[in-house]
Amino acid sequence: MKTKVLATVAFVLFFVMGSMAQKSVNSTTQEIKIKTSAQCGMCKDRLEGALAYEKGVKKSVLDLTDKVLTVTYDSKKSSPDKIRQIISKAGYDADDVAADKAAYEALPACCKKKTSQTGCKPGCGGH
C-alpha cells in the first residue's frame, strides 16, 4: 500500500515539476512583427531562410499581402535589433532599418522595390 502511495506522489511531483519547467522555458519566447520591403515568393523564401540560421529564432513567417514578417524567438539568444540586421543584410528593409545596399543590389529584379504604380524598379527610367 505504501508503495502505491509513494509511486502516486512521485508521479504527481514529476508531472508538476515538468509543467513548471515547461513554463520557464517558454517565458523567454517572444514574437515580433517587422514591416519589410519583400515583394514576392522568392523574397519570402530568402527571408525565412536567412532567419532559420539565426541562433534563438524558432519560427519566421512572411505574409506577402501586408509584407510583415512575424518572428518567434528566444529573447535570451536573439533580439529585435539582431533580427532587423539579418533582414537588412539579406537586402530588405526592416521597419526603420534600411536594406544593406550591396545586398539589395544583388537581389533579383522581382525582389526589388517598385517605385511607382507602373511597377518600375529603381533606375528603370520610367515609361
Image: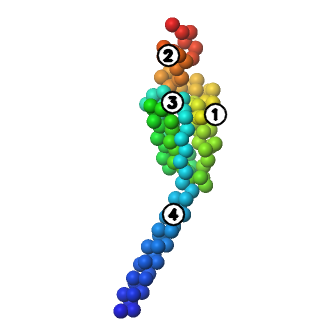
Tell which circle, 3 or 2, labels the residue nearer the N-terminal end: 3
Disc 1 to disc 2, how far (Cα)? 24 Å
Residue 100 falls in image quadrant: top right
Tell which circle, 4 or 2, labels the residue nearer the N-terminal end: 4
Nearer to us in this view, 124 or 28: 28
Q: Residue 105 location, x and y as percent?
A: 58, 23
Disc 4 to disc 3, how far (Cα)? 35 Å
Name the residue: 50% across, 42% down: 70
Nearer to us in this view, 17 or 103: 17
Label 2 sits on what residue type? Answer: Gln
Disc 1 to disc 4, how far (Cα)? 33 Å
Name the residue: 54% across, 63% down: 24
Q: Quick check: can you spot residue 52?
A: no
Disc 2: which residue: 117
Q: Are marks 3 and 1 in contact (CB under 8 Å)?
A: no
Q: Secondary structure at mark 4?
A: helix
Q: Residue 14 location, x and y as percent?
A: 45, 75
Disc 4 to disc 2, how far (Cα)? 48 Å
Callout 4: few (<14), some (14-19), or many (20+) C-alpha neighbours within 10 Å? Answer: few
Q: Are marks 4 and 2 in contact (CB under 8 Å)?
A: no
